[in-house]
Image (cartoon, rainbow, N blue to C red):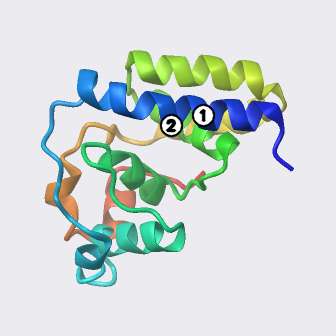
Amino acid sequence: MKTLRYILLERLYEWSKLPYRLLFKKESPWGISVKDLLTYPMESLGYHLGCFLLKHHFTPEPQLEDHDIYHVLTGSGISVPEEIAMQFYLFGNGKRSLYLFTVLSIGAILFPDHIKQFRDAYKKGRKAHAFYHLNFLKLLQQPLITLQYTFKITTI
């Protein structure tokens, strides 16, 4: 059974998606489907993204496609603490935004029992070369393992 803290954070995310996209995301949507992604070579980032989306019954969120790429690159899950840990990873990697700081703050307050997980993710993000700012649409053909090796991305 999900506790109130899980439900609260899930609702906050759902409510914040549209305003975040409208106010902060200036990139064009990729216009790519899960079916399209699964046509990429099996070792590619695009194929792995398609598998991730299919596995979790997701579709690409317009202008938020990078978020799912971060899951694939870092091997992070989709539970609330794993989502927060991924944001700590990205913070360690150099990403800075008001939205990220909000997630880190609320996550640390609501999930103090996961602080070690968050700290470990932050440290892994610091060790990796900065990748949060890449144009991932142009990298969908690249082998996932090559990107992880090149940027020293270790899984969470």
Q: Is residue 92 visible?
A: no
Location of mark 2 (residue): 14
Mark 1 element type: helix
Q: How many marks?
A: 2
Mark 2 element type: helix
Q: Could you tell me the amino acid type at mark 2? A: Glu
Location of mark 1 (residue): 11
In the image, 131 versus 83, the foreground residue is: 83
Check the image and report above or below for 89 versus 32: above
Cβ atoms at labels 1 and 2 below 8 Å apart: yes
Q: Is residue 100 visible?
A: yes
- Residue 128 vs residue 30: left or right? right
Residue located at (43% from left, 56% from top): 73
Residue located at (32% from left, 56% from top): 150
Q: Residues within 10 Å of mark 1 (few under 14, many from 20)?
A: few
Residue located at (31% from left, 50% from top): 65
Q: Residues within 10 Å of mark 2 (few under 14, many from 20)?
A: few
- Residue 149 vs residue 120: left or right? left
- Residue 1 vs residue 148: left or right? right
Q: Could you tell me the amino acid type at mark 1? A: Arg
Where residue 3 sits in the image (x, y, percent)?
Answer: 84, 38
In the image, 126 versus 81, the foreground residue is: 81
Where residue 122 sits in the image (x, y, percent)?
Answer: 58, 32
Dividing the picture into quadrants, the one containing residue 58 is bottom left
Where residue 110 sits in the image (x, y, percent)?
Answer: 75, 24
In the image, 88 versus 77, the foreground residue is: 77
As measured in the structure, the alpha-carbon distance from the residue carrying label 1 to the one carrying label 2 is 5 Å
Residue located at (16% from left, 31% from top): 26
Which label is found at residue 74? Answer: none
Where residue 12 sits in the image (x, y, percent)?
Answer: 57, 28
In the image, 79 versus 42, the foreground residue is: 79
Check the image and report above or below for 133 versus 35: above
